[in-house]
Image (cartoon, rainbow, N blue to C red):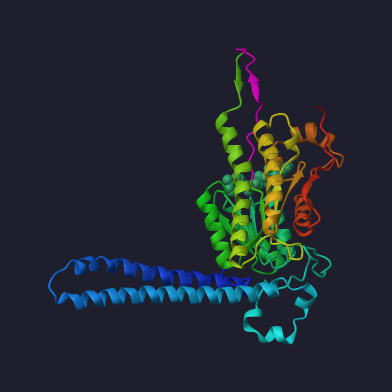
Amino acid sequence: MASKEKPVNVFAELISALRAAADQNIAAQSQVLESWSRYLPRVQQGGPAWLAPLRQLHQGWADAVVTLARSQQEMIDQQFDTAIKSFESVWTKPKAADASPAPAAVAQPVAQPVVEPPPSVNGSKASPTQSVEGDMNIAQRVAVVTGAAGGIGAAVAKDLAQRGARAVVMVDLNDAVNETAKAINKEVGRDVADAVVGDTSDPDFRARVFDDAASRHGMVRICVPAAGITRDALSVRVDKESGKASVYPIEDFRKVTEVNLIAPIYWAMEMLARIAEDRRRRGLKRWEPTEEMEGAVVFLGSVSSQGNKGQISYAVAKAGLEGGAATLMKEAIFHGVRCAIIHPGFTDTPMARALGDDFLNKYVLPFTQLRRLIRPEEIADAVCFMVSNSAVSGELWADAGWHPPA
Ligand SMILES: NC(=O)c1ccc[n+]([C@@H]2O[C@H](COP(=O)([O-])OP(=O)(O)OC[C@H]3O[C@@H](n4cnc5c(N)ncnc54)[C@H](O)[C@@H]3O)[C@@H](O)[C@H]2O)c1
């Protein structure tokens, strides 16, 4: 997306920018003080009498700067407190009042451009509805989807865009994500998809994506960390000739765990941390059910989390995600963020197609009630449902009735 758009939460972002500017100002003054302070001892070390006034001058000047810096800081803190209180009072106002603001509220400059633009669509493509207390609306929200070059990630990104997301940051190791984002923008008819190429297991890259997203589009509030890999092999394989047993390569185990388990959880925690800081800046503490949801995370688990032959590392990583989702679900609600996990069955993406037609026809389709692969759009629809419907928490199995024999 080439053009820089208006920040989503104008007032909150203004406060945060002002505070940063104030901090910089104080830091600059401290630096000046520090660099000048090294002259003071020399002046204070006795010396000729004519230095005394100079010493007083320096001391007086330093004191004056300290006083000035302190009073500036106090003044800024007071102004922030007042602004945040006004902000809070409007933020926590009942929704009915928000929908048609009283003239008095319009007249107060601090109370006006308060929250993110009121969502018009409750995550639904078909019927715009009034926002309900505790809902998480997709419309006007900023989302990050990883593994978005193709498959399920691309389908989720497109669905979020179609449901009115303000921006969808599409992350993938594969630079095909650029083309996927372009295609989504064309189809949706606006510059909503923003592609970024990089490795989700790189913490610096992760922080950069969230920094850029915040400055280009606003606070990220929807996170679907879908990037995933497989390194399938039996846990223990016995060589027919030699009778020697080899175990699953540990480096593959580490890689699969890094990408499929650790990275998604850290992407979710990155969003959570930023939302938590933002609430803190706005003077908000524990999330109250009368507020709108602050954010939502949906992890991509798998039916393999229940155990699947040849997928020791993948199954462990996906089962681990269940623990991550369950723990974050309990912790993140303090900050108004919901976490959940979806377990797709075999879905028609490059990952499943890599298994080969023979495998799919022999081991997958006969044990799937639908007798076909799941479409990525079906998983995307379920993910958006999990994001937008706040009554949904925990796990959702979207496996097309796959019941493999033992
Ligand atoms: N397809 C299925 O049958 C199925 C079933 C259950 C769960 N899932 C899960 O759904 C998610 C999406 O799977 P898919 O089927 O669309 O797979 P896919 O292989 O089609 O897409 C995965 C994407 O992740 C990207 N990726 C991989 N490692 C990355 C990294 N380190 N950094 C950034 N991007 C990276 C790949 O480039 C790819 O575009 C995965 O987590 C997968 O485990 C898939």
Q: Height in image: 370 above or below 283? A: above
Q: Is 114 or 371 nearer to us in this picture?
A: 114
Location of residue 38 in the rendering, given as x and y in whole percent from the top left corner = 25, 65
Q: Is 255 or 352 nearer to us in this picture?
A: 255
Ligand 1 image-quadrant field: top right
Q: Where is residue 78, by image quadrant?
A: bottom right
The residue segment tinted magenta is 228-243
The residue at 49%/77% (across/down) is 75
The residue at 52%/71% (across/down) is 17
Q: Is residue 102 left or right of residue 179?
A: right
Q: Quadrant of the C terminus?
A: top right
Q: What secondary structure do most residues of the magenta stretch adopt?
A: loop
Can residue 1 be seen in this snapshot? no
Q: Height in image: 389 above or below 216? A: above
Q: Is residue 257 left or right of residue 67?
A: right
Total tally of numbered discs in the picture: 0
Q: Where is residue 135, by image quadrant?
A: bottom right
Location of residue 321 in the rendering, given as x and y in whole percent from the top left corner = 68, 42
Can residue 162 be seen in this snapshot? yes
Location of residue 295 in the rendering, given as x and y in whole percent from the top left corner = 69, 59
